[in-house]
Image: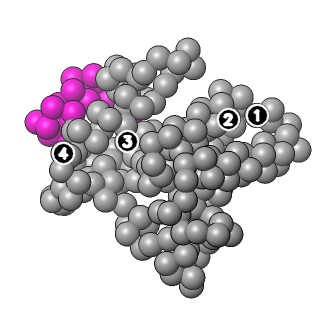
């Protein structure tokens, strides 16, 4: 396995635990280690060992599945950084591709929570994982949009939330045309 130094002061286990605890069941409760284990088809004690820092997954397919299930990037899980987050915002690099930020993990907590709430709503209403990933990309792109007067880092949270809501309107409209009620 590739060993990477943690750059955020958190261990791999800390990031798995934080990401797992952010996840919600359809009833609204936080995911347990058992919930994550079932989603990945591994034993609960394996998840416990990951979170306690006694081991990391060796199989790249498990790391990829773990990142996908927890809705974070593998780079963030393994090393505490996200390659896309290091590139800079649209305001700082106007030649960067619009929509390059695809993970809500790169957003401040209130904005990320709203994106995940919308994604959970989509998944509970029958969206596929691919549709949910594309919706997340659109919602995050809406939050990081280059049309705002100020760069992302200088914007107030209410502006960011408003842009996420506008992107949500678009996502829900498109899905309604395809028979999915958001």
Residue 11 — which label?
A: 4
Q: Would you say residue 163 is visible in this rendering?
A: yes
* Callout 1 touching callout 3 (CB < 8 Å): no
Is disc 4 surrounded by few (<14), some (14 to 19) or many (20+) residues within 10 Å?
many
Q: Earlier in the sequence, mark 2 or mark 1?
A: 2
Q: Residue at x 65, y 57 (%)?
A: 142
Give residue 182's mark. Answer: 1
Image coords of residue 106 (percent x, y): 44, 54
Which x, y percent locates residue 153?
A: 47, 63
Element type where label 3 sits in the image: helix
Residue 57 image point, x, y percent: 23, 44
Q: Residue at x 55, y 14 (%)?
A: 27
N-terminal of the pair, mark 1 or mark 3, is 3
Separation of marks 3 and 4 at Cα, in angstroms: 15 Å
Rounded to the nearest angstrom, the CA distance separating label 1 from label 3 is 26 Å
Judge by depth and name the residue closer to the eye, 75 or 142.
142
Determine contact: label 4, label 1, CB under 8 Å: no
- Secondary element under disc 4, as helix, strand or loop, is loop
Q: Is residue 46 magenta?
A: yes
Task: Measure how far apart labels 2 and 3 are at the Cα level.
Answer: 20 Å
* Pointer 3 residue: 66
């Amino acid at each position: 396995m590739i060993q990477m130094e943690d750059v955020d002061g958190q261990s791999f286990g800390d990031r798995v635990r934080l990401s797992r605890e952010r996840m919600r069941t359809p009833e609204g409760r936080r995911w347990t280690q058992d919930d994550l284990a079932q989603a990945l088809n591994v034993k609960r004690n394996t998840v416990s060992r990951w979170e306690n820092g006694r081991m990391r997954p060796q199989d790249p397919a498990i790391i990829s599945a773990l990142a996908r299930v927890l809705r974070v990037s593998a780079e963030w899980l393994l090393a505490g950084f996200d390659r896309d987050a290091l590139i800079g915002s649209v305001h700082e690099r106007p030649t960067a591709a619009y929509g390059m930020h695809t993970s809500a993990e790169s957003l401040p907590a209130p904005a990320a929570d709203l994106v995940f709430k919308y994604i959970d709503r989509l998944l509970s209403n029958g969206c596929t994982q691919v549709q949910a990933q594309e919706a997340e990309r659109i919602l995050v792109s809406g939050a990081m949009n280059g049309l705002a007067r100020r760069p992302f880092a200088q914007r107030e949270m209410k502006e960011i939330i408003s842009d996420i809501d506008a992107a949500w309107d678009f996502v829900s409209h498109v899905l309604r045309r395809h028979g999915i009620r958001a």
